[in-house]
Amino acid sequence: SDLEPYSGQTFPGYEKVDLGFEQMEGILKNEKQDWRGALQNIKGIYLVTDKSNGKKYVGSAYGEYGVWSRWKCYMETGHGWNDELTKLIQEKGIGYARQNFKFTLLEYRPTRVDDQEIIDRESFWKKALLTRNFGYNKN
């Protein structure tokens, strides 16, 4: 069942990262080395999907430790400090994120890539997926 603690699959490759919040939480809390090694060494664009209503949020990671630390922020807060997600989680609690959010890696780049390239690709995905119109992106 979905309630069992996640045993921790091995890292499936960048093109196959698509995990529920609780699965991701298990991987991050257990500091799974294969996942950590892969995710802290890339910048990327990711999708958060709310399974309860289909709404999506496109985000990006380009700071130190890349996607790993960006996603760690979600595990700690439920919302990663994004305006619309923050409102939602303040209202409904982190349990809502655990139950409904899933994370998909859309694109990844080596850490040496300029941050602007990541920001541009993030904008592309927001437009392509209409997440400003119908999702949780506001900018």
Image: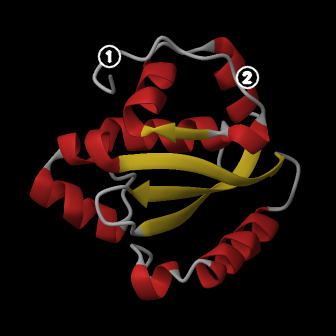
Q: Secondary structure at mark 2?
A: helix
Q: Position of residue 6 (x, y in %)?
A: 43, 17
Q: Which residue is mark 1?
A: 4
Q: Amino acid at mark 2?
A: Gly
Residue at which label 2 appears: 37
Question: What is the distance, in whole Å, between disc 1 and disc 2 at their CAs?
Answer: 25 Å
Q: Point out the residue furthest to the front here.
A: 1
Give the residue type at disc 1: Glu
The residue sitting at 41% across, 83% down in the picture is: 134
x and y, in percent, of residue 90 in the image:
15, 57
Front tag of 1 and 2 = 1
- Dot 1 or dot 2, earlier in sequence: 1
Depth order, front residue of 49/64? 49
Would you identify the image quadrant in which residue 11 lies? top right
* Label 2 packing within 10 angstroms: few (<14), some (14-19), many (20+): some
Q: Quadrant of the N terminus?
A: top left
Is residue 69 in sight in this rendering? yes
Q: Residue at x 34, y 53 (%)?
A: 79
Residue 139 in sight from this viewpoint: no
Q: Is residue 109 above or below residue 66?
A: below
Which corner quadrant of the image does residue 55 belong to?
bottom left
Q: For residue 98, which numbered disc appears in the image?
A: none
Q: Position of residue 24 (x, y in %)?
A: 48, 31
Give the x, y percent position of residue 29: 43, 19
Give the left or right position of residue 133, taking residue 9 as reference.
left
Q: Is residue 72 left or right of residue 9?
A: left
Q: Which secondary structure, mark 1?
A: loop
Residue drawn 45% across and 47% down? 102
Task: Mark 1: give few (<14), some (14-19) or many (20+) Cα within 10 Å.
Answer: few
Give the side of residue 101 with respect to residue 112, left or right.
left
